[in-house]
């Protein structure tokens, strides 16, 4: 049987060990909580910074950049105050970004030129059809629509073929449709020249006016190969400032 003082000493050692273990556990838990709090604060700060970049892009109407920042914010920092603030409007920002990208694509379809020709400067705005057509040439090819302005030759609108020919010598009718509206006839004519396979649309003013409000223009025209062909043009990206005085 151990002496009393030995048992007391052992108990004291055990209690001390338990106290040390408890203190160590408490310290580790406190450290863990402090680390978690620091990490949460760092996430909130990073999210807030990204939200600032998102807000700046929205203020500048840079919808594509805003979508990038907003999507990254929700993916990288979910559950943050910044993510909660951005999420409700992100669908609208995404829609605007898609529209901006589409408008940029449409604008790139047009080609503008200013060249010295005859007694003055010729300005043109030209676009190719969405799909190639079999117009009687060696292979299907796109059709070009040209809007021209010249001080001597005045204004005009005409189609150009790479192959085949129009069946419009002496005049003809083409069918013109804008977006989902019904097609309407317009007078056209093919000049007797071999310089280009071109057919002029007489009502160039009406064509321009309607085209400036439309997204899609369809022109059905007769060809020498027989029948008619329909050229579809995505005209929604036309920059009217390139042709001063037309609007």
Image (cartoon, rainbow, N blue to C red):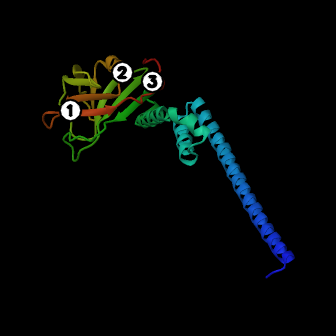
Closest to the observer, 23 or 98: 23
Q: Earlier in the sequence, mark 2 or mark 3?
A: 2
Q: In the rendered view, would you say 26 is above or below 135?
A: below
Q: In the rendered view, would you say 95 is above or below 212?
A: below
> From this viewpoint, is residue 197 visible?
no
Seen from this angle, which residue lies furthest left?
226
> From this viewpoint, is residue 106 visible?
yes
Q: Is residue 97 left or right of residue 171?
A: right
Q: Quadrant of residue 24?
A: bottom right
- Label 3 environment density (alpha carbons within 10 Å; few <14, some 14–19, many ≥20): few
Q: Earlier in the sequence, mark 3 or mark 1?
A: 1
Observer-side mark, 2 or 1, equals: 2
Residue 172: image location, x then y, percent: 18, 23
Residue 61: image location, x then y, percent: 55, 30
Residue 35: image location, x then y, percent: 70, 54
The residue at 19%/27% (across/down) is 168
- Label 2 environment density (alpha carbons within 10 Å; few <14, some 14–19, many ≥20): some
Q: CA distance from mark 2 to mark 1?
A: 22 Å
The residue wearing badge 3 is 240
The residue at 42%/36% (across/down) is 102
The residue wearing badge 2 is 208
The residue wearing badge 1 is 166
How many numbered discs sit on the rendered protein? 3
Q: Secondary structure at mark 3?
A: helix
Q: Secondary structure at mark 2?
A: helix
Q: In the rendered view, would you say 159 is above or below 244?
A: below
The residue at 65%/40% (across/down) is 48
Closest to the observer, 19 or 121: 19
């Amino acid at each position: 049987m151990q002496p009393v003082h030995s048992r007391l000493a052992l108990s004291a050692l055990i209690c001390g060990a338990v106290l040390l273990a408890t203190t160590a556990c408490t310290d580790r838990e406190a450290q863990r909580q402090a680390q978690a709090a620091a990490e949460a604060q760092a996430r909130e700060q990073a999210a807030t910074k990204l939200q600032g970049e998102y807000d700046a892009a929205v203020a500048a109407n840079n919808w594509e950049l805003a979508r990038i920042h907003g999507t990254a914010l929700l993916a990288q920092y979910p559950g943050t105050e910044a993510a909660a603030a951005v999420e409700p409007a992100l669908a609208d920002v995404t829609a605007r970004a898609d529209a901006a990208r589409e408008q940029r694509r449409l604008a790139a379809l047009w080609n503008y030129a200013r060249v010295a020709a005859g007694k003055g400067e010729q300005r043109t705005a030209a676009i190719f059809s969405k799909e190639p057509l079999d117009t009687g040439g060696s292979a299907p090819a796109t059709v070009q629509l040209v809007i021209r302005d010249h001080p001597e030759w005045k204004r005009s609108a005409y189609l150009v073929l790479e192959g085949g020919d129009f069946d419009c010598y002496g005049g003809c009718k083409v069918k013109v449709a804008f977006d989902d509206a019904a097609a309407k006839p317009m007078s056209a004519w093919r000049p007797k020249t071999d310089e280009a396979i071109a057919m002029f649309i007489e009502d160039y003013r009406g064509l321009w006016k309607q085209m400036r409000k439309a997204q899609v223009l369809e022109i059905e025209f007769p060809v020498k190969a027989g029948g008619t062909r329909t050229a579809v043009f995505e005209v929604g990206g036309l920059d009217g400032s390139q042709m001063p005085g037309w609007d």
